[in-house]
Amino acid sequence: MSNLNKLIALKNKHVFNISPNENVFSALKMLVDNNIGALVVMEQGKTLGLFTERDYARKVVLLGKNSKEVLVAEIMNKQPVILAPKDTIANAMQLMTDKMVRYILIMENEQLLAIVSIGDLVKYIIDQQDQTIQYLNKYISS
Ligand SMILES: NC(=O)c1ccc[n+]([C@@H]2O[C@H](COP(=O)([O-])OP(=O)(O)OC[C@H]3O[C@@H](n4cnc5c(N)ncnc54)[C@H](O)[C@@H]3O)[C@@H](O)[C@H]2O)c1
């Protein structure tokens, strides 16, 4: 199966990130404004963790906390799943399933290259299958 670098080549290069010192309300606003479900937490170019809607639901709302009083640093996942661009799509799917996460960070030499969501993987696989079906249809009818 393909490597992740094939998938990330098709993606928008910008990765939305937030400082660990911002409050959760600002993070949620950024999620809504950009129609995404996760933000990479960064400080001075260093990747510190991942903030997701799931963190908000479990570590703020259900604990009765106020999103303007909780910092991103307090609830972020400090050990997000990380893969390299040379790792396979199959590897990414396996890790998402095993670790029950929806996002994987793609890093190389400590540099963040991309964020890959479960939706990205599903879309990539469906597109690949469509291409194979089209190729086989052409082959059969030629
Ligand atoms: N049609 C498409 O091209 C497409 C692609 C991906 C997801 N989706 C749909 O969006 C919905 C949720 O998708 P999801 O599971 O991918 O989660 P999501 O809503 O968080 O992600 C949507 C897209 O934004 C990107 N993204 C997420 N966080 C980002 C960040 N911090 N910086 C830069 N990009 C970021 C993802 O990689 C993905 O491409 C699903 O309904 C899915 O089917 C559609």
Image: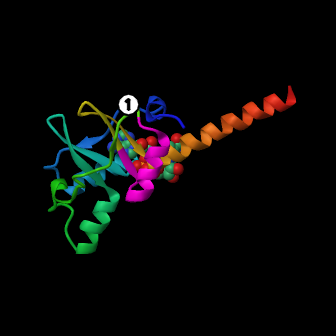
Q: Quadrant of the N terminus?
A: top right
| Residue displayed at 25% across by 67% down | 59
* Near-viewer residue (112 or 33): 112
Position above or below: 141 against 80: above
Residue 43 located left or right of residue 8: left
* Residue closest to the eye, 93 or 75: 93
Disc 1: CA contacts within 10 A as few (<14), some (14-19) or many (>=20): few
Magenta-highlighted residues: 87-104
Residue placed at 27% from the left, 50% from the top?
50
Q: Is 53 in front, or is 1?
A: 1
Number of on-image labels: 1
Q: Residue furthest top?
A: 142
Q: Is residue 40 magenta?
A: no
Instruction: Kindly indicate the quadrant of the structure image that contains residue 136.
Output: top right
- At x 54%, y 40%, the residue is 124
Give the residue type at disc 1: Lys
Q: Quadrant of residue 65?
A: bottom left
Q: Is residue 120 visible?
A: no
**Residue 63 spot, x, y in % from top left:** 23, 74
Q: Position of residue 6 (x, y in %)?
A: 48, 30
Label 1 sits on residue:
13
Image-based side of 141 in relation to 21, left or right: right
The spot of residue 137 in percent (x, y) is: 79, 34
Quadrant where the C terminus sits is top right
Asked whether 89 falls inside the magenta stretch, the response is yes
Q: Main secondary structure of the magenta part?
A: helix
Task: Tell me which residue sits at (47%, 34%) in the image.
Answer: 3
